[in-house]
Image (spheres, coloured by chain):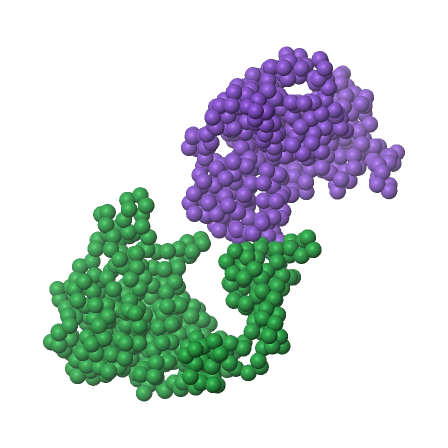
Chain colours: A green, B purple
């Protein structure tokens, strides 16, 4: 039986599944239920200065749905906690006392001045919480007041506040990053420069979910107007994975502990973030969609998969995908693939054909000998994978590596690795032989 | 195998309480609700060169209309359907989709569960009809007049297309109201809520179509006269003849032609007042036999037997229709050929049938006879085209296999006369095929008249 326990910045939790700082962690009642359901830790909903903020009294959430109203993306315009600071602090202390084996991180957001940060850090320390997360990510409402993503978008501010926090508190400091920035490596480097112990990402993506075509206003609509919100949920996962990978393989931040966030819905999503180096993962939308019980599937699925793969603990596979994330220029151009259609699985919908015919390389037949049949024409197939992606049947179309002569080019395929850096068409090539990217090692998360 | 015969025929109305009758005659396939429509529409793969569209006799662009439904554009979806098949609402209800579009749906290939195209089509066409606005506009008037004989699916389809193209159309029909088999022939539970009448009303809203009912070809109107007074003629005459059993006792009371009986049922305004036998036997193996049997059962007949002279595999009714009959309590019996109807005091009390066998594909007698007690017998052994009305004057129309011969454009052998629907040779006796015939003929008529206009202009 795999051991799912983690030690992130020295903070122990029985499993890597934490609830992200969000509505589900706003109150003792909710967090109590989360821990009963089996969550390994929580990041308490962001605390701010008194008097507390106020929220809109109209709709706070918007969504995009897939078939059968499966929730793909959830957008919110809720602010940080709207409850009094002391109420939250008392509840945090009580919950931590009742659940000593669970991770209790407190999210914070106060104005960009040293005194407020110093003051609130002292109060949090008294609760017995395990660490703090600096909310530099929230893209709506608070950012208009110079907080949240307004800080996260200025690396100098991140570094400055992180430094204050490390100076004024013994607690581990996690900086939560906003994805609403061009290059995620800069804020991550700033967090590290300021002495932060870890980063967590991604916070929500600035978004307008839809426009109501009857009253021409964004949704959710409040008295005829709408405001952009922050989107999370399954739709943001690919962006989150990329940003996590960017930080994990950036030499300036490689090895910095990461708590992964962004659309994690199943154990598989979680395992992917961990494979990219994350020491823990944070979940919100899945819980808000299905309730806290979803953690039980995550625990069971991750555990079964680790057993199957022979991983005794999280560290056994953490970061193992990082060395395989590389730059385009290092991809092997001598890796030649062709699509293969399993005719026994094909249901003849023809989507592969029309996608290839209309939008790609005219490499799939529509009939053979006068009969409706979809076959790959190797002499035209560039191996792009579009047909695989549009086929409605799993494993019906696969990509197969070929050797020998590529029927498309008529040229022999070199059986050695070869990339753009040494390609004859690359006028900027400086090397005669391709550069092979070296492995990146992942230091222990607890360091 | 001999049932004791009843002393006298038991044929009575009101066998079932009103609620049960209403339930029995309610929609065979109720409309999908809004959620089910979304879920079902999402199942469509939007195939390339879609097999469903190829299987549809009217070539409705099925993936296109389903995609329109998916995006909340049911009205657009309805227009896509109706532009190919103006009777798309009725076809959604009566088409044997299990042997047409849904049979070849790739979901059927993949999982044995096709997209429910018929029900999605019904949803979209219902939405269009619910707006109360006719979705098509007529082209500029051409000044041409066309006579359409027969207000069934073929004639209505032809008339609508012609009107849309700017022609003036007069439809003549022998019945007292238009609709043809949609109004008089389709089983009641397939076209509930007076749908046939409402659809005709919807169709005629295009304008430019005059309907003259009670006009019988060869009695009130003549082909020669129509050819003289109109620029073109379309014949959608249907099959007016019913085949006779030619056995003893056929004229006894309680012996009915199933087509006429169904027509009477379709026109009744109170099913509770319609008499039905306690024991009913339907003779035949086609759709009419199934429709008569199922509706007899629905009216409250205790025992309903469909007796077919050949084996199950030879039945014209699809396996799906057979299943409907079986699940509604109709007993299907095979290899039974009627020998004579048994009557007492002029009323049916049963029938005697002979067991048949198929030997080398030929039907042979076995000599063994079977008697089934019955209060009513419905004959559903096929319909035929009656060409008598075509005569008169010099209008000669070539027939083929007893029906009107037409070419690919539905032109008959007589210049200026087109034909379509069940009365033409080579058809499949399906509503949807009749609609296509009418549409194709209309396009051909339009092309011919346009060519004439060009000649005149030169």
Where does the N terminus of chain B fall, quadrant-wise? top right
Residue A236, percent across and down? 37, 65
Between A320 and A61, the one lying in front of the other is: A320
**Is B152 positioned to the left or the right of A447 in the image?**
right
Check the image and name the residue furthest to the left.
A115
Could you tell me if residue A31 is visible in this image?
no
Spot occupied by residue A145 in the image (x, y as percentages of width and height)? 16, 64
Q: In the image, residue A434 lies at what x, y percent?
A: 47, 84
Determine whether B108 is above or below A434 in the image: above
Q: Quadrant of residue A173?
A: bottom left
Quadrant position of the C terminus of chain B in the picture = top right
The one of B389 and B431 positioned closer to us in this rendering = B389
Q: Nearer the viewer, residue B426 or A74?
A: B426
Give the residue at x 32% y 70%. Answer: A202
Q: Residue at x 81, y 23 (%)?
A: B247
Q: Is residue B425 visible?
A: yes
Q: Residue at x 58, y 65 (%)?
A: A380
Query: Which image quadrant for residue B393?
Result: top right
In which image quadrant can residue B257 be found?
Answer: top right
Instruction: Looking at the picture, tell me which residue is in the foreground, A368 or B90.
Output: A368
Return the x and y of residue B135 as percentages of the image width and height. 45, 32
The residue lying furthest to the front in this view is: B458
| Residue drawn at 60 percent across, 77 percent down | A412
Tally the numbered discs.
Answer: 0
């Amino acid at each position: 039986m795999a051991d799912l326990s983690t030690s992130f910045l020295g903070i122990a939790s029985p499993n890597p599944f934490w609830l992200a700082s969000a509505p589900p962690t706003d109150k003792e009642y909710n967090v109590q239920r989360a821990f009963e359901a089996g969550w390994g830790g929580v990041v308490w909903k962001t605390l701010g200065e008194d008097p507390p903020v106020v929220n809109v009294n109209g709709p706070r959430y918007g969504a995009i749905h897939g078939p059968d109203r499966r929730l793909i993306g959830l957008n919110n315009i809720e602010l940080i906690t709207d409850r009094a600071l002391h109420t939250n602090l008392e509840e945090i202390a009580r919950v931590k006392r009742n659940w000593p084996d669970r991770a209790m991180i407190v999210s914070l957001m106060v104005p960009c001045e040293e005194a407020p940060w110093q003051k609130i850090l002292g109060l949090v320390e008294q609760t017995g919480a395990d660490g703090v997360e600096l909310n530099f990510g929230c893209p709506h409402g608070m950012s208009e007041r110079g907080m949240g993503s307004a800080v996260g978008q200025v690396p100098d501010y991140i570094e400055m506040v992180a430094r204050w926090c490390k100076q004024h508190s013994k607690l581990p400091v996690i900086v939560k990053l906003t994805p609403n920035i061009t290059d995620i490596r800069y804020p991550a480097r700033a967090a590290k420069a300021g002495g932060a112990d870890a980063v967590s990402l991604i916070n929500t993506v600035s978004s307008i979910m839809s426009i109501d075509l009857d009253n021409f206003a964004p949704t959710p609509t409040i008295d005829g107007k709408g405001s952009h919100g922050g989107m999370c949920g399954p739709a943001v996962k690919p962006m989150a994975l990329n940003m996590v990978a960017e930080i994990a393989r950036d030499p300036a931040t490689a090895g910095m502990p990461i708590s992964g966030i962004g659309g994690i819905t199943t154990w598989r999503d979680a395992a992917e973030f961990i494979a990219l180096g994350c020491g823990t993962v944070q979940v919100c939308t899945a819980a808000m969609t299905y309730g806290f019980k979803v953690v039980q599937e995550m625990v069971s699925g991750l555990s079964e998969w680790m057993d199957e793969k022979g991983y005794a603990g999280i560290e056994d596979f953490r970061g193992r995908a990082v060395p395989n994330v590389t730059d385009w220029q290092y991809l092997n151009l001598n890796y030649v693939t062709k699509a293969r259609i399993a005719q026994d699985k094909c249901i003849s919908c023809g989507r592969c054909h029309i996608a290839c015919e209309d939008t790609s390389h005219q490499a799939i037949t529509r009939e053979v000998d006068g009969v409706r049949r979809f076959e790959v024409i190797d002499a035209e197939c560039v191996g792009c994978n579009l047909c695989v992606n549009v086929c409605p049947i799993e494993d019906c179309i696969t990509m197969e590596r070929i050797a020998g002569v590529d029927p498309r080019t008529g040229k022999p395929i070199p059986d050695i690795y070869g990339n753009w850096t040494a390609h004859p068409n690359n006028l900027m090539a400086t090397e005669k032989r391709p550069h092979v990217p070296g492995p990146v090692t992942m230091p222990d998360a607890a360091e | 195998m001999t049932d004791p015969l009843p002393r006298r025929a038991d044929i009575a109305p009101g066998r079932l309480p009103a609620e049960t009758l209403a339930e029995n005659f309610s929609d065979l396939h109720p409309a999908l609700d809004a959620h089910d429509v979304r879920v079902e529409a999402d199942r469509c793969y939007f195939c390339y060169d879609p097999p469903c569209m190829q299987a549809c006799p009217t070539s409705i662009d099925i993936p296109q209309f389903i995609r329109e439904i998916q995006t909340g554009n049911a009205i657009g979806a309805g227009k896509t359907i109706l532009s190919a098949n103006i009777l798309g609402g009725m076809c959604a209800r009566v088409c044997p989709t299990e042997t047409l579009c849904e049979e070849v749906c790739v979901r059927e290939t993949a999982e044995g569960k096709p997209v429910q195209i018929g029900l999605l089509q019904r949803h979209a066409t219902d939405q269009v009809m619910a707006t109360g606005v006719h979705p098509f506009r007529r082209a500029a008037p051409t000044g041409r007049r066309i006579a359409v004989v027969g207000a069934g699916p073929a004639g209505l389809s032809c008339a609508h297309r012609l009107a849309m193209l700017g022609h003036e159309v007069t439809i003549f029909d022998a019945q007292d109201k238009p609709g043809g088999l949609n109004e008089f022939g389709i089983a009641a539970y397939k076209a509930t809520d007076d749908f046939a009448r409402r659809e005709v009303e919807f169709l005629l809203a295009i304008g430019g179509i005059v309907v003259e009912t009670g006009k019988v070809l060869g009695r009130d109107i003549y082909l020669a006269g129509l050819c003289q007074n109109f620029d073109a003629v379309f014949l959608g005459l249907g099959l007016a003849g019913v085949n006779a059993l030619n056995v003893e006792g056929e004229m006894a009371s309680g012996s009915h032609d199933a087509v006429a009986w169904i027509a009477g049922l379709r026109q009744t305004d109170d099913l509770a007042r319609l008499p039905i036998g306690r024991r009913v036997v339907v003779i035949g193996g086609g759709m009419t036999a199934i429709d008569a049997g199922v509706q007899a059962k629905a009216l409250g007949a205790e025992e309903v037997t469909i007796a077919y002279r050949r084996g199950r595999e030879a039945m014209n009714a699809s396996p799906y229709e057979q299943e409907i009959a079986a699940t509604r309590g109709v007993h299907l019996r095979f290899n039974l050929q009627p020998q004579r109807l048994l009557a007492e005091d002029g009323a049916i009390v049963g029938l005697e049938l002979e067991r048949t066998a198929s030997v080398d594909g030929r039907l042979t007698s076995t000599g063994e006879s079977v008697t089934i007690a019955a209060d009513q017998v419905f004959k559903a052994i096929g319909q035929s085209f009656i060409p008598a009305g075509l005569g008169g004057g010099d209008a000669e129309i070539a027939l083929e296999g007893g029906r009107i011969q037409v070419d690919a454009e539905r032109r008959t052998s007589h210049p200026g006369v087109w034909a379509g629907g069940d009365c033409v040779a080579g058809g499949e006796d399906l509503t949807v095929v009749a609609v296509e015939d009418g549409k194709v003929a209309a396009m051909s008529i339009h092309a011919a008249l346009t060519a004439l206009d060009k000649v005149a202009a030169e």
